[in-house]
Image (cartoon, rainbow, N blue to C red):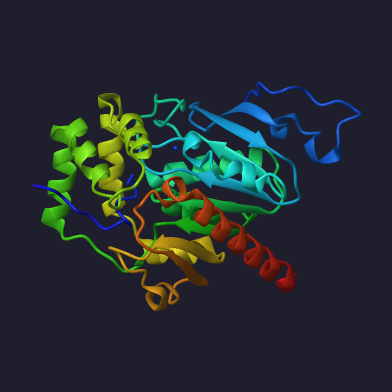
Amino acid sequence: MVLRFPLLFLVLAALVSGCSGPGSSTDAPAEIANPAITPGKHIFTAADGVEIPYRVNGVGETTVVFVHCWMCEGSFWDAQVPVLVENYRVITLDLPGHGEGGDDRETWTIAGYGADVAGLIEHVDLGPTVLVGHSMGGPVSLEAAARSDRVIGIVAVDTLQDAEFEFDAPIADQIVSSFQNDFRATCTNFVENFFAEGEAGEVVDKVRRVGCEESNAVAGAALMRDFIAMDIPAMFRAAGVPIRAINADAPNVTQVETNRKYADFDVLLMHNVGHYLHMTRPDEFNGLLLETLEQMLGSSSAME
């Protein structure tokens, strides 16, 4: 049976203490004097000791932090980084249990990932920060914004379509059991159903290869169960920042008026595209992302 789940849950459709980058010098520009934000790869150590690799590109007054989807990794944003570095500092990361992130964590939750992202923001001492979160990265960004007053906005990428959506309990149990019983097959079926007809095969292959390894089973199934229990209206309110979505127009319709009951929310839609829209149609997506950031930052400046 092909299971089709709402993209909010599909979240998945689907991520320092010590720094490995070069040290600062007295001649370094003020904006990159902190070695934790010099361009390059670094390691942030979360509160529980798990290592989180992150990569810095560019410099700028505003930082854009990309938060990837369930069972994905920071490289899923490779088509966005070169476009943004002309105007922003850009950070990508691998959340624990994803990519090169540490996997020695006992409890896997969205709230825990939100604390990880907020901790990284504080660690590198960022100024104004916008979080761009795909799928699971949307709820993670909500949690991070609630923990860090440096976050001034969230760009949700094919996620957070309906703050009031609730899962039927038996269906939710069936979904979690499927991942627990046969993670690889269930994950493969799951992600393949979130691509539009004719979308790039290499993207499908990458998502399947990165996400559906059996080694992801424990974290993947636990996160699935946690998604079901999320109180999105409360998370919208707690985030307390503007949320601007770039979503596919189908199959899940973004409920703009519903979401506006809980947050400053708006959306731009892409048509005839699957869940991984930033990877399969990067040029179109990047244009919408730049437009969204400019609008969000302009509004933020006007309120000061």
In this rendering, the answer to whether 130 lies above or below 34 is below
In this view, which residue lies farthest toward the front?
198
In this rendering, the answer to whether 108 lies above or below 225 is above
Quadrant of residue 5 within the rendered picture? bottom left
Q: How many marks?
A: 0
The one nearer the camera, 213 or 204, is: 204
**Residue 94 location, x and y as percent?**
48, 33
Q: From the image, which quarter does the C terminus lie in?
A: bottom right
In this view, which residue lies farthest toward the left?
1
Image point 44% across, 72% down: which residue? 262
In this rendering, the answer to whether 275 lies above or below 17 is below
Image point 40% across, 78% down: which residue? 257
Judged left or right of residue 106, residue 118 is right
Image point 86% across, 31% down: which residue? 28
**Residue 27 location, x and y as percent?**
91, 29
**Residue 300 location, x and y as percent?**
68, 67
Quadrant of residue 82 within the rendered picture? top right
**Residue 219 location, x and y as percent?**
31, 34
In this rendering, the answer to whether 303 lies above or below 168 is below
Image point 33% across, 38% down: which residue? 201
Judged left or right of residue 12, residue 245 is right
